[in-house]
Amino acid sequence: MSDAFILEAENLHRVYEMGSVEVGALRGVDLQVSHGEFVVILGVSGSGKSTLLHLLGGLDRPTEGKVFIEGEDLSELSDNQLADVRLHKVGFVFQFFNLMPQLSAQANIELPLFLADIPSKEAQKRSSELLSLVGLSERRDHRPTELSGGEQQRVAIARALANQPKIVLADEPTGNLDTATGADIIQLLREVNEQQQQTVIVVCHDKRLTTVADRVIEMRDGQFISERSGKGGKV
Ligand SMILES: Nc1ncnc2c1ncn2[C@@H]1O[C@H](COP(=O)(O)OP(=O)(O)OP(=O)(O)O)[C@@H](O)[C@H]1O
Ligand SMILES: [Mg+2]
């Protein structure tokens, strides 16, 4: 595989076994993403978006096909090596935020830094910078239940960025937010992409995201059905 692409997927299939029934959630997906690209993948519920994102970020393994991150074949990695790739190279943002409820905003952001053995002083410095980046310095000591949905998603984005991953994967990041808050989150993802040259892949139903995307791919029934350039602009 060439390392012209930061991320490549080759003929991805994912079959879920449900007792005697097999669900073909992904049915032959190929994808090549360039460094610094902002890609949006649109599709209706059940089209395989989350399944795809999990495979791209090494949260799950394909039934068939391969994923390469910076030319490295994820199928050749052990579970521990894969966890390492997730920790250092990929940041995940989820629809339901997935923050640790008992930890403050700042401690949530520091969690992946501690997992990566970053000394606590450095972790504190970095989490403070990230809180400022997402506009939440004043909320550093709040727990998730003491934050609005949009604020929780900002913390989740800061956490995803903690180890300066080259790739940020977001699964319906605006799905649980009102329109205006969703627009702010989209803008934040675009800023991250532009200012830090992070590659961003978002899967969603939210058509507004196509206005900031460099490329828009549409999915149906586990396959890509169309692809076009996005507007690459503001929300
Ligand atoms: N763990 C699982 N076991 C069995 N079937 C699954 C599992 N996860 C997903 N599926 C099935 O695979 C298909 C794709 O699911 P997926 O979650 O990837 O869709 P999606 O596009 O993310 O949908 P949504 O927009 O609702 O989040 C669906 O038909 C779903 O029922
Ligand atoms: Mg989904």
Image (spheres, rainbow, N blue to C red):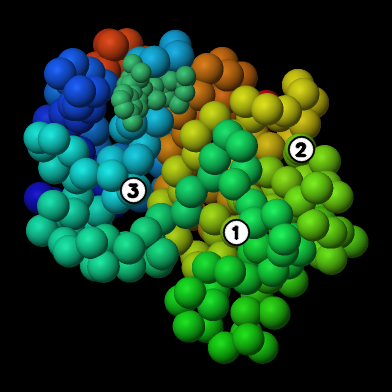
Query: Which amino acid is tagged 2?
Result: Gly
Residue at 54% of width from left, 40% of height from top? 94
State the image coordinates of residue 209 (x, y, percent, origin top left): 57, 25
Q: Quadrant of ligand 2?
A: top left
Q: Position of residue 169 (x, y in %)?
A: 45, 43
Q: Mark 2 touching mark 1, by CB under 8 A?
A: no
Q: Residue furthest front?
A: 19
Q: Secondary structure at mark 2?
A: helix
Left or right: 195, with 235 as reference point: left
The image position of residue 53, as x and y in percent, is 36, 37
Q: Earlier in the sequence, mark 1 or mark 3?
A: 3
Q: Is residue 139 left or right of residue 18?
A: right
Residue closer to the observer: 95 or 215: 95
**Residue that badge 3 annotates:** 59
Above-or-below relation of 110 to 178: below
Q: Residue at x 86, y 50 (%)?
A: 146
**In the rendering, at what x and y percent does residue 1 appear?**
10, 50
Q: Which residue is mark 1?
A: 159
Query: Which residue is identified by label 2?
Result: 149
| Location of residue 69 with respect to 170 vertically, above or below | below
- Cα distance in 3D space between marks 2 and 1: 15 Å
Residue 55: image quadrant is top left
Q: In terms of secondary structure, where does tag 1 sit?
A: helix
Give the residue type at disc 1: Arg
Residue 71 seen from this side: no
User: Residue at point 73% right, 46% down?
Assistant: 152
Q: CA distance from mark 1 to mark 3?
A: 17 Å
Closer to the N terminus: mark 3 or mark 2?
A: 3
